[in-house]
Amino acid sequence: MRLLLTACATTALVVAGPLTATAAAQAAQGPVGGELLTAKPTVVASGATPPAVQASAYVVADVDTGQVLAAKAPHAKLRPASTLKTLTALVLLPRLKKTDPVVGTDADAGIIGSKVGVYPGLRYTVDQLFEGMFLASGNDAVNALCMHDQGGVKATIRRMNAKAKELGALDTTVTDPTGLDADGQYSSAYDLALFARAGLKRPDFAKYAATKYTNFPNVGNKGTYQVANQNKLLFNYDGALGVKTGYTTLARNTFVGAARRNGHTLVVTMMNSPHGITEDASKLLTWTFTNYGKLKPVGALVKPATGQPPKAQPKSQPATTRNSSTTGASQARTALNPGQAVKSLAFRIPDWAYAAPPVLLLGLFLRRPRTLRRRRH
């Protein structure tokens, strides 16, 4: 028994050693995009105080320069819901011909979640399916597009994960191209901003993202029906460029929006918001446009890698050429929701502490009971 306990304690110490070394190695590198862009629930801005919003995480960035102008928990890994379709589009758009015909299947029609109305046996074009994916967030359209591409859904997932690494979106792991709450599927407000920036550089992506209405084929070739874009920013914000909304039970409201005013194009991404997503996005955009001249960047959207994914930036190097430091007056602190707070606390516990309980308990097991010691005298 003593040998077994000693072995267990030794194993715990051996495991704790490499974990501590790994944590130390990670601590030597700053977060992607700059040292201020962490997963902590701190609102970071320099030059003006941003409005309070309900999202657990957000990023506001300049699409043209890549400068991050405000952020809150930008690298927190959260469920993306249908905003992940921005990455799906980045993978599928260059691979599929817009005029190709696609016949709907039972698998398309039977998929769970939001649908645009893909019907088995009905013929669609790739162009129509992309409209259904962007405007109605149709999971049925996503499935049809993935299956039309070589390798189907599984190959699309592999390509999406590879594309995320290429763009520097290291917080993202894809297991379902629709964005549903699949096991192990996460992204971040920072990564969603990277996807939006890459997408808006493509004319086709930008066109689909900004389309307010489209007509979709009806069952039995009986004409069409109108589909409206779910991104309300397009209808009530001057200069809005759309992009993508999302919602699931676990992700709650997620959002990717963009707008252009006064020669500047901004993107705002928000995750894990209970409600009021459009109003909060409008607040952040208006605040940024209003204060643009006095805002200093707090980080940067990294450029896509040519081969290897970008490494985290060392803390000794500034994230941008402009001053990225912040003061107490230019920062606001907010609290994570209870679930995130528990995770945050767990991540702050040093790895060696997990080995301490077995070592401390070892002495209790190894001490001989007094009755046994008396018998030997």
Image (cartoon, rainbow, N blue to C red):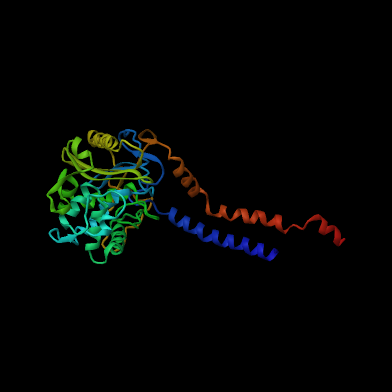
Quadrant of the drawing holding the N terminus? bottom right
Quadrant of the drawing holding the C terminus? bottom right
Q: Report x, y in % for residue 184.
A: 39, 55
Q: Residue shown at 45%/57% (left/top)?
A: 25
Q: Report x, y in % for residue 262.
A: 16, 37
In this rendering, would 160 be left or right of 216? right
* Viewer-nearest residue: 47 or 368: 368
* Viewer-nearest residue: 219 or 356: 219
Q: Is residue 306 above or below residue 128?
A: below
Say whether residue 324 is visible.
no
* Viewer-nearest residue: 291 or 52: 52
* Viewer-nearest residue: 206 or 125: 125
Q: Report x, y in % for residue 279.
A: 27, 34
In this rendering, would 181 be left or right of 63? right
Number of on-image labels: 0
Which residue is most to the right?
377
Q: Residue shown at 78%/56% (left/top)?
A: 369
Q: Which image quadrant for residue 119?
A: bottom left
Q: Which image quadrant for residue 329?
A: top left
Q: Report x, y in % for residue 230.
A: 23, 42
Say whether residue 243 is visible.
yes
